[in-house]
Image (spheres, rainbow, N blue to C red):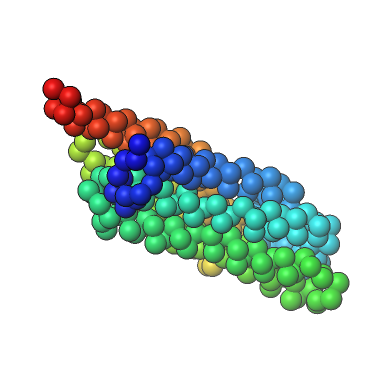
Amino acid sequence: MRNEIEGDPLMEQSVHFRLQRWSAWSGFLVLVAMLIAYGIGDLLSPMSPTMSQGEVVDFLIKNQHGILICVAIMVLTVPFEYPYVVVTSMQMKRVEGGWGWLSMVQLTTGVVAPTGFFYPLAILAAAAYRPESHSPDVLSAMTDIFWLMYVGNACIFVLQVWSIGLASYLDKRAKPIFPRWYAHLSMLLGVLLIPGAFVFLNKTGPLAWNGILAQGLPALAYLVWKIATPLVLLKAIKGEEAELAEKAASEAEPANS
């Protein structure tokens, strides 16, 4: 039997929800791949902005293969961020009663998210690809660009996480799609991403690209949020499936009576 689902009139309901679950799990996939890839490339802890050009060159030569493997893993797995972003907006639009401002802001900002990985990593890969062919000042500049883009551009996604948090606060349903604690977490992450904008002005201290405010706390909050979001989505998808089953059962009762 086929069931009509908004936007998917010819899709079986079971397939619709299976795709949503796979999309939610893809968030975990990206997180795990990121941790593995950055561990291989020795990039989990940012290097100091005050490292000398010689130290930067030594780092690139020592970690050349790890960095290139890291980039390859990320190129293969980061595209799975897209279904994860899409299913988040699909659940948000249940709050708005269809596609609205919040779900569209989350979708459009989330679509940009993979570029925050691809472009900086491509620059770092170019530096590590042939370090013996470039002068130390060029390699140092390319490494600076990587860290400045990777940490500094994170604040671009403040609106993404705030739109999710705001949707959670505005949900007046008896059984909210997203729990209130998740709204708090999303708003907090947005606040913690803002100091990243100041890495362009600092080489030392908490607002440098390896500082506690610009990188440390945001990275920790992002890790917690990235674990929590797929779990919240899976619960929301289960709730939507149950709602449709209850609606179908209630519509069938008059027909059987």
Residue 35 falls in image quadrant? top right
Counting from the top left corner in percent of width and height, residue 93 is at 29, 49
Judge from the rendering whether residue 233 lies leftward or rightward of residue 49; answer left or right: left
Q: Seen from this angle, which residue lies furthest top?
A: 257
Q: Position of residue 108 (x, y in %)?
A: 39, 62
From the viewer's side, name the closer residue of 170 and 210.
Answer: 170
Q: Which residue appears at 22% of the width and 48% of the height?
A: 97
Q: Position of residue 91 (x, y in %)?
A: 34, 45
Corner quadrant of residue 58: bottom right
Question: Could you tell me if residue 203 is visible in this image?
Answer: no
Q: Quadrant of the C terminus?
A: top left
Q: Quadrant of the N terminus?
A: top left
Q: Nearer the viewer, residue 88 or 256?
A: 256
Q: Is residue 54 above or below residue 163?
A: below
> Depth check: 208 or 149 in front?
149
Give left or right: position of 178 versus 29: left
x then y, percent, for residue 131: 82, 70
Left or right: residue 64 compared with residue 74: right
Residue at the image point whose x is 49% and y is 55% from the top:
82
What's the residue at 69%, 65% (across, down)?
124
Above/below status of 256 relative to 227: above
